[in-house]
Amino acid sequence: MFHLAAGRVGSLAAKRATAALSTSSARMMASHGHEVSTAVDMSKPQYTDSADYPLPDVPYKQVLTDADKSLKQKEKGPWNQLSKEEKLALYRLKFLKTYPEMRHSTPEWKTALGAALFLMGLTGFIVWWQKVYVFPKRPRTFEGDWPEKQLKRMLDMRINPVQGISSKWDYEKGQWK
């Protein structure tokens, strides 16, 4: 009886160890050897820098140092006694970027333009390759005197005389109307 219980405990411990190892190895495989990031709780207020949303839910710096706390106390007094650096430090406690910093363009447009031009060049290369190696040569009826002879034959046969090409030809004068 004891042997049977010990066997069950041993197999349970082995299963748990295997599951723990396989879970951690699967997590390592999924993260390609890097630390797995955790999910952000979106039910709590978040800080965002956006010109469209000028007042974020929470201040940028949530944990204040002693110097920041004394500056916050100084903020409650008259602002004309604060220096420009202190006003800027107070602003940086609440916000990460100023409006000009938020509106400052990034060089991302260069990447997008480069990708678009690369894809256009690749498309042009594929079209050229198909024209040279895939598509057959143009029929002989497209070159030389063939189109002119074909037009003359259509006029002689009076094809589509109401609204088509024959309606635009003056048969008495032998020229276009």
Image (cartoon, rainbow, N blue to C red):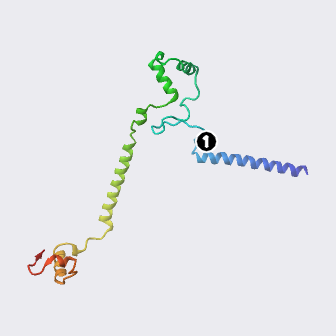
* Relative horizontal placement of residue 162, taking residue 54 as reference (left or right): left
Q: In this picture, is 167 found above or below 32?
A: below
Residue 163 position in % (x across, y down): 22, 77
Residue at 57% across, 21% down = 69
Q: Residue furthest bottom?
A: 157
> Amino acid under label 1?
Ser
The C terminus, quarter of image:
bottom left
Foreground: 1 or 49? 49
Task: Name, please, the residue furthest toward the top.
Answer: 81
Residue placed under numbered mark 1 in the picture: 43
Q: Quadrant of residue 161?
A: bottom left
x then y, percent, for residue 96: 49, 31
Q: Residue furthest right?
A: 1
In the picture, measured across the screen, residue 51 lies left or right of residue 146, that is right
Left or right of 54 in this view: 5: right
* Nearer the observer, 90 or 13: 90
Q: What is the number of callouts on the image?
A: 1
In the image, residue 132 sits, relative to residue 47, either above or below, namely below
Q: Is residue 66 above or below residue 6?
A: above
Please tell me in which quadrant of the rendered image residue 134 appears: bottom left
Where residue 24 appears, x then y in whole percent? Answer: 66, 45
User: Residue 130: which quarter of the image?
Assistant: bottom left
User: In screen coordinates, is 167 left or right of 33?
Assistant: left
Residue 111: x and y in percent read 39, 45
Crowding at mark 1 (Cα within 10 Å: few <14, some 14-19, many 20+): few
Kindly identify the residue that appears in the image at 55 percent across and 29 percent down: 61
Of all residues, the one furthest to the left in this rendering is 173
Q: Is residue 54 above or below residue 168?
A: above
Q: Helix or strand or loop: what does disc 1 sit on?
A: loop
